[in-house]
Structure formats: C-alpha cells, structure tokens
Image (cartoon, rainbow, N blue to C red):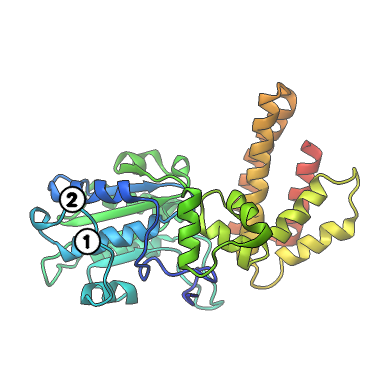
Amino acid sequence: MSDERPGILDGAVHPAEQTKLFGHAEAEDFLARSYRSGKGHHAILMEGPEGIGKATLAFRFANHVLHHPDPSDAPESLAAPSLASPITRQLAAGSSHNLLHLTRPVDEKSGKVKSAITVDEVRKAGKFLAQTSGTGNWRIVIIDPADDLNRNAANAILKILEEPPKRALFLVLTHAPGKLLPTIRSRCMPLALAPLSDADLVSALDSLGVAPSGERAGALIEAAHGSVSEALKLVNYGGFDIVEAFRAIVDGPAEPPRRDVHKLADVLSAKDSDTVFSFFCQHAADFVTDSARAAALAGDIARADRLAQLSSQLGERIAIAQGYNLDRKQTIITVLDDIRAAL
C-alpha cells in the first residue's frame, strides 16, 4: 500500500491511518496504565531511531485518549484503532478538531516539504490549544519529529510546554534526543523505544506487502537496523545500489575514477531525490561513526580521533546544505572526498 501524502515513503502507510503496530507492546501498556492512573505526564518524549513506529504509537495513544476522555474509565491496554469509529476516521483523515499533527509543512510554491518546522507552524499549535474544545475533550499535539523544529520554533514550543493548558497532551517524537534543547527534554517524560527485532521487522514489512525474500532477505534485515523506513528505502528507493556504490568509492583505489563519484552524485542530486539524498547522508554519517568506533576498539586512537572529528563536521555540513538548499552534488562529492581522506 502506498500513501500519497507528502513526506510518506512509497509503500508506507501514514501513521494516522495505520492500524497495526509491531514491537512496542510494553510501551503501549505503560502509556495505557499511566493514563488510567490520572497521573500521566502532559508531555511525553518518544525517543528512538527513525522508522520504528513512534508516530504510529503516538496516534494510537491519541486515539485511546480521545475515545476515553475520562482516565478512570479507560482500559488498561491500547486497542488497535477501528476504522468503524468516527473518531478514528477523523484522525485518519486529518480532520479531528482535537488533534494537531505538527510536522514539516509543504511549500506552497514548490509543492515540496520544507526542511524544518517553522515558528509559524508552532503558532498554529498555540491557536489550536487556545480554542475551547466543543466537547470538553482533550487537545493533543503530536510533534513529529521535534528534531525538525528550527531554533525559533523550538523556543516557541518550550514556552507552551512551560505553561500547558488544561487537558492538553503533547506527544513529542525525536530520533536524536541529544540534539533537542535541554529545556524541552526537561519538560517531558522520556519514553525510549528500541529498534524492532528481526521478527517484528519482518512482520511489519509483511503487513505492507514488502516482506523480504530471496538472497537479499538477510542483507535487508541486517542493513535496516530494526527500522521499517530504512528497509523501505533499501527496497523501494535503490538503497542497496547506493550503499554498494558508496562502499566501492570509499574502499576503492587511492584515486577512484571521478566518473564513478560523479555518477553517484548525479543520482543523489537529481530532481525529486530528497529521499535518496537523505538516505545517503545518513548512511555516510553512520559509516563514519562505525569506523571511528572500530578504530578506537582496535587501538588506533589517531584514526579514531580523525574520524570522530569528521563525524561532527559531516553532521554540520549536511545540516547546512539541507537548511540552505546548497548544491547537493557538490555536497556529496565533498563528503566522499572527506571520508576517503580521513580513512
């Protein structure tokens, strides 16, 4: 199944429409019990790698809360959303008056998803929370993910979290909690979610109709690192070919053919290549981090330090390139050259 909403990968289902969740039963039970106790926190920070089901869990919990506005009457477990319910259908359609999904907006001129959640989007959250719910129900804001908040937006969210309205619930998602403002983290209750097990990942992919099979099944499970979105990028976006080309360049001869470097850069910087460009950037960053760790374990401190410094520099360079829409081809060539030099 494919969802045509902006920002949704080919083969994926929007979290608001997803009725299945794999691998997070313990977190589901915790949220249900915490809510039923009447002592649940007003802001929950769902931490974990991208693509493991954080947004799906957030929508499932929101569905639970809106179906059971009185915590004392709520069951002790989260049920799978039923599309027979008007509340569920409203959430799936994005038309609920009691939930705001705060994510990167679409640029009206280009039709593309913007690179950050801006302060204008956060102002929408302020207006949403200021409105009195006609049903006296909860008002829920899902920030997906908070990593995408720019500085002004992050400060604006912080002000709301510091003085939250009554019956307001914030579900704050993050792939990298260490990058968030410490003051935002301190206002939230952390809920760490682990990558999916191999069995849960296979089940999740099977539910999407992309269960791994054949020679690449084992390679897919290993390369996806428990992330459904990573697996989809490998299967539906040529991720395996990108990884293979990347490794051929960084592990190749001292002077790799420039045509190979430019060929990969051309593919990753082509029109409508946001997904593969981000995939490459993340893979390159992970490769450098893993290489630094391996060098440290092997006792090669100089190499480990060199790679660790590069890891920090790459993150900054990629963030600047994405934030200011710099020439992607040149960014890719520079990243490859820097990695080869550090190795």
Q: Earlier in the sequence, mark 1 or mark 2?
A: 2
For image coordinates 15% across by 68% down, the residue present is 133
82 displayed left or right of 193: left
Where is residue 19? Give x, y as percent: 34, 67
Callout 1–callout 2 Cβ contact below 8 Å? yes
Where is residue 6? Give x, y as percent: 49, 73
157 displayed left or right of 194: left
For image coordinates 60% across by 49% down, the residue present is 222
Tell me which amino acid carries mark 1: His
The quarter of the picture where the C terminus appears is top right
Q: Which residue is mark 2?
A: 35
In space, the residues marked 1 and 2 are separated at their CA atoms by: 10 Å
Reply above or below: 93 against 311: below
For image coordinates 25% across by 64% down, the residue present is 63
Q: Spot the residue most to the front.
A: 214
Tell me which amino acid carries mark 2: Tyr
Mark on residue 64? 1
Reply above or below: 37 against 96: above
- The local secondary structure at tag 1 comes to helix
For image coordinates 40% across by 58% down, the residue present is 144
253 displayed left or right of 339: right
